Image (spheres, grey):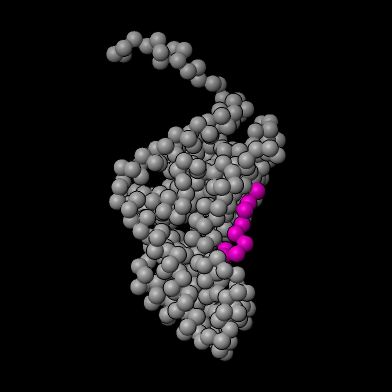
Amino acid sequence: MADERPIIFSGIQPTGRKTLGNYSGGFRQYVQTQEAGEAFFCIVDLHSISVEYDPADLRSSTLDLAALLFATGLDADRSTVFCQSHVTAHGEAAWLLSAVASYGQLGRMTQFKEKAAAHEFVSAALFTYPVLMAGDILLYQTDLVPIGDDQRQHLELTRDVAQRFNHRFGETFRLPDGQFPSVGGRIMDLQDPTSKMSTTLSSEQGAVYILDSPDAIRRKFKSAVTDSGRDVRYDPAVKPGVSNLLEIMSVATGETIDALTRRFADAGYGELKEAVGESVVELLSPIRERFEALRADERELQRLLAVGAEKARRASEPTLEQMYDRMGFAKPEAGRFFGAARPRGL
Ligand code: LTN
């Protein structure tokens, strides 16, 4: 890859309301990385059926996420934004790779164990989830995978699966590396700054959603939990609340935490909270407005996704073909018995 642009792939679940934490550790990175290489952003709807879900919700949240990805700055001309279920190679790759994924290793996945413990019905899809993810990544000969820390183990499994396949069937896959967010990767809950701001676990007041109204955002920052003492400084162990606020403002304005600490050194917590809230309103308002415009035109969204799916199909096809071939499947001979020579009407 020395003289080529790296191939970048990430998958985003369409379910759950996306938070400021998702923006800071995810969407923001996607926009930056689309400049750095050939980027694929996949709405992983097939992953979302691994836990209990509502079909009508899946459909609308898939379009929501598409609109949000474009609203946060992904460019359909520069990157490939597509829906996993639109490209059948993903389902196929998952089945083929399940032959070289270890049952024992899948059972040791932390995310599987946690989710399995939390649900009454544990689907087989929840267990094989990381194999589908491995296929997503490997089909595109990906170099870099922007992901959160919670996905490290799944990426490790992806590399193991790729290596086992290469070893058993011949060199087929490039081994991907993770790209983890440095600053802004850990935005904490406003009500409980010792735990991460979470789509599923945070309370309504503890999480700021990307699509929150300006008033809701201001209210949430006004009631954010701070720390004892009155001084504003960055020290997550001793001052988790204030440090989180400084971190959020740094994400929103692009200023360094040092500069912000100096600016607010003599301010009270009330003043800090208001300033942070305002900076987040300024960050999110244009995104929300673009989202609303994009989401209102479903035909255009579907068209953009169709363009993305076609690009993704073309990019993944050679690797999928190679997988079938190396694994010993007899190739279907396209057009030889049917197809072009087939009389009309039959
Ligand atoms: N498991 C990931 C989503 C995901 C993904 C991928 C991320 C599915 N396929 C491929 C990167 C690459 C998650 O829950 N965040």
Name the image quarter holding the N terminus: top right
| Nearer to the camera, 275 or 157 | 275
On screen, residue 85 above or below 251: above
- Residue nearer the viewer, 139 or 289: 289
Q: Is residue 9 visible?
A: no
Q: Residue at x 55, y 55 (%)?
A: 29
Left/right placement of residue 35 relative to residue 277 reads right
Q: Is residue 307 left or right of residue 238?
A: left
> Residue 185 in magenta?
yes
The extreme bottom residue here reads 229
Task: Classify residue 256 by image quadrant.
Answer: bottom right
Q: Position of residue 68 (x, y in %)?
A: 41, 54
Q: Is residue 63 visible?
A: yes
* Viewer-proximal residue among 118 and 207: 207
Q: Give the image location of residue 309, x and y in percent.
A: 44, 37
Residue at position x 53%, y 37% from top?
93
Majority secondary structure of magenta residues: loop
Say if the magenta span includes residue 21: no
**Which residue corresponds to the image point at 52% horizontal and 57% vertical from the top-left?**
28
Residue 252 vs residue 48, the one in the foreground: 252
The span shown in magenta is: 177-188
Rendered-image quadrant of the C terminus = top left
Residue at image coords 57%, 79%: 263
Q: Quadrant of residue 325?
A: top right
Residue 315 in picture, x, y percent from top left? 53, 34
